[in-house]
């Protein structure tokens, strides 16, 4: 594990797509497990704001040190529409004969949230936010007048660190040559107990043949 990487190719974010979620089944000191990955709908916009613990030390009438540490993430995602089956699943609402019954005090699931950010070079950033509790949803509905006004839904989620490893988020940029296509293809296949690892290169067999007719040596 390290913090040095190769230089990324120049690219700029232009679109958010493919929002997904999965339930946090358990989170213990040993590991975090997740349920199946499902689509959240069609994303329009996301805002991710860091929650911080800050402190400033004064000495001799001046600031001598200042520290800010990330403690969580506050997320607001706007979608074209949150379908009723998604809302019922995330918020544990009962459903009878196609009717969602929203009961006060119902505790939502803890979930992970994933999404993809398209870039100008044709590649994407890939994100998993690892453990969050959704707030009740918000919606905006407008009357159509001269023009058609589309209505949207917004979901807000507060993310905290996992018990298993203190992690808040995984993200990767396919514009950086260290992140492979195979990793990108596997990013949303399952919940983010860990992130997709690079495939190990197979060992190559090398043969050395002596031109003087002596026995052949094989190096593995």
Image (spheres, rainbow, N blue to C red):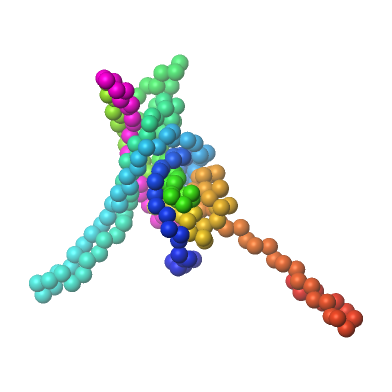
Q: Is residue 196 left or right of residue 120?
A: right
Write the residue at 23% across / 59% down.
54
| Image height of 110 relative to 103, above or below | below
Q: Is residue 188 left or right of residue 209?
A: left
Q: Position of residue 145 (x, y in %)?
A: 26, 19
Write the residue at 47% across / 56% down.
175
The answer to which of 119 and 160 lies nearer the viewer is: 119
Q: Is 159 in the magenta?
A: yes
Q: Which residues are magenta?
A: 144-167
Tell me if residue 149 can be seen: yes
Tell me if residue 104 can be seen: no
**Quadrant assignment, res 143:** top left
Q: Is 169 in the magenta?
A: no
The answer to which of 134 and 2 lies nearer the viewer is: 2
| Image height of 81 relative to 217, above or below | above
Q: Position of residue 25 (x, y in %)?
A: 47, 42
**Quadrant assignment, res 158:** top left
| Image height of 212 relative to 96, above or below | below
In which quadrant will I find the C terminus? bottom right
Write the residue at 37% across / 34% down.
79
**Main SS of residues in magenta:** loop
| Image height of 157 relative to 150, above or below | below
């Amino acid at each position: 594990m390290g913090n040095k990487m190769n230089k990324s190719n120049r690219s700029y974010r232009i679109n958010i797509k493919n929002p997904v979620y999965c339930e946090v089944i358990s989170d213990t000191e040993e590991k975090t497990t997740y349920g199946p990955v499902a689509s959240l709908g069609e994303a329009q916009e996301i805002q991710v704001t860091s929650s911080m613990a800050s402190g400033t030390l004064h000495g001799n009438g001046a600031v001598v040190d200042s520290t800010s540490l990330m403690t969580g993430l506050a997320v607001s995602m706007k979608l074209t529409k949150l379908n009723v089956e998604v809302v019922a699943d995330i918020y544990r609402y009962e459903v009878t004969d196609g009717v969602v019954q929203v009961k006060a005090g119902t505790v939502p699931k803890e979930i992970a949230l994933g999404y993809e950010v398209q870039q100008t070079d044709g590649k994407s950033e890939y994100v998993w936010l690892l453990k969050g509790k959704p707030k009740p949803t918000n919606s905006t509905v407008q009357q159509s007048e001269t023009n058609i006004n589309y209505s949207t839904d917004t979901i807000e989620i507060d993310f905290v660190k996992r018990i298993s490893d203190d992690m808040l988020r995984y993200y990767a940029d396919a514009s950086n040559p260290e992140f492979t296509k195979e990793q990108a293809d596997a990013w949303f296949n399952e919940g983010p107990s860990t992130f997709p690892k690079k495939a190990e290169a197979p060992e190559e067999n090398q043969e050395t043949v002596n031109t003087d007719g002596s026995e052949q040596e094989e190096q593995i």
